[in-house]
Image (cartoon, helix red, strand yellow):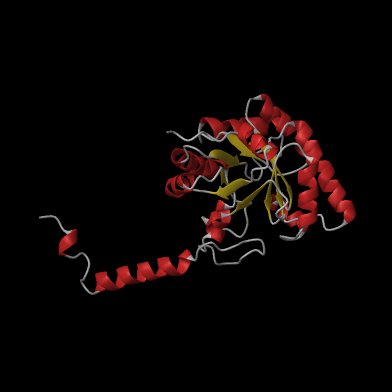
Amino acid sequence: MAQKKVTAVSLLEMKQRGEKITMLTAYDYCTALLMDQAEIDVLLVGDSLGMVVMGEENTLAVTMDQMVHHTLAVARGAKRALVVGDMPFMSYQLSAEQAAENAGRFVKEGKAETVKLEGGADFVPHIKAIVRCGIPVMGHLGLTPQSIHKFGGMKVQAKTDEAAEQLLKEAKTLEDAGVFSIVLEAVPAAVGEKVSKELTVPTIGIGAGPGCDGQVLVFNDMVGLFERFVPKFVKRYAELAPVMREAFTRYRDEVKAGEFPGPEHVYK
């Protein structure tokens, strides 16, 4: 029997019945297929690909063409999971019209079903313009990596009572604008829990504590492929980097020694 497709509406229903939402980043077909088979609910084609796939220092250099390219690959592997295209830096900030046009590219060219964008009240017109086109929008508050220079680095947000209240206000503003969910990144656990309880739409936490309605991690972090640094909120569910290095080394040694290919690997 075919599994029921996860949709933006599904996430709201999951929150209403108290079922936690699972989300991971994905950047290619093979990984997306495995995640789909594991019944991960949401696959985010994150602009984090700039760092973990392309080797950039941050996410700011990622282009729409690159995001659409990777989103299409993920969409081909995701039959059950909801696919979210992450709108990169300067793909929506200039105007509501620009936002709607590029969100449309994610759907038409990348086969995404929803998009995500960073920012609060300043981007309400942009969110409304996208939703008006029939494209569901996921919000993103707290630490928003595209604003890294404004924050002075990757720093925990909403640490004071005043900042926490402002975050809650921004979250409610996004909800009123029509988002179907909101990512909360790098905020104190108590703040993540409070915001989650105050909102009707589900929250997806990354470094925002267990009180959020769901959780997301960067794939390369949680399987131990990205070794440049490990954020505090990351749990390593596997250590694939050493395993892969060992496989590459064995291959090199066997080819150099004339052991590969062996008789079982050649055509007769």
Q: Which picture quadrant has residue 63?
A: top right
Left or right: residue 200 compared with residue 247: right
- Percent across and percent down for residue 19 are 64, 43
Say which residue appears at 48% left-offset and 39% top-offset.
Answer: 75
215, 225: nearer the viewer: 215
Residue lying furthest front: 17
* Residue 262 visible in this rendered orientation of the protein: yes
- Percent across and percent down for residue 22 are 59, 47
* Residue 46 visible in this rendered orientation of the protein: no
69, 95: nearer the viewer: 69
Q: Which picture quadrant has residue 249?
A: bottom left
Q: How many marks?
A: 0
In which quadrant of the rendered image does the N terminus lie? top left
In which quadrant of the rendered image does the C terminus lie? bottom left
Residue lying furthest right: 162
Left or right: residue 169 compared with residue 123: right
Say which residue appears at 56% left-offset and 60% top-offset.
Answer: 221
246, 237: nearer the viewer: 237
Q: Determine whether 71 is above or below 208 in the image.
A: above
Say which residue appears at 76% left-offset and 56% top-offset.
Answer: 189
- Percent across and percent down for residue 130 are 67, 30
Say which residue appears at 53% left-offset and 46% top-offset.
Answer: 40
Left or right: residue 182 compared with residue 10: right
- Percent across and percent down for residue 137 are 66, 35
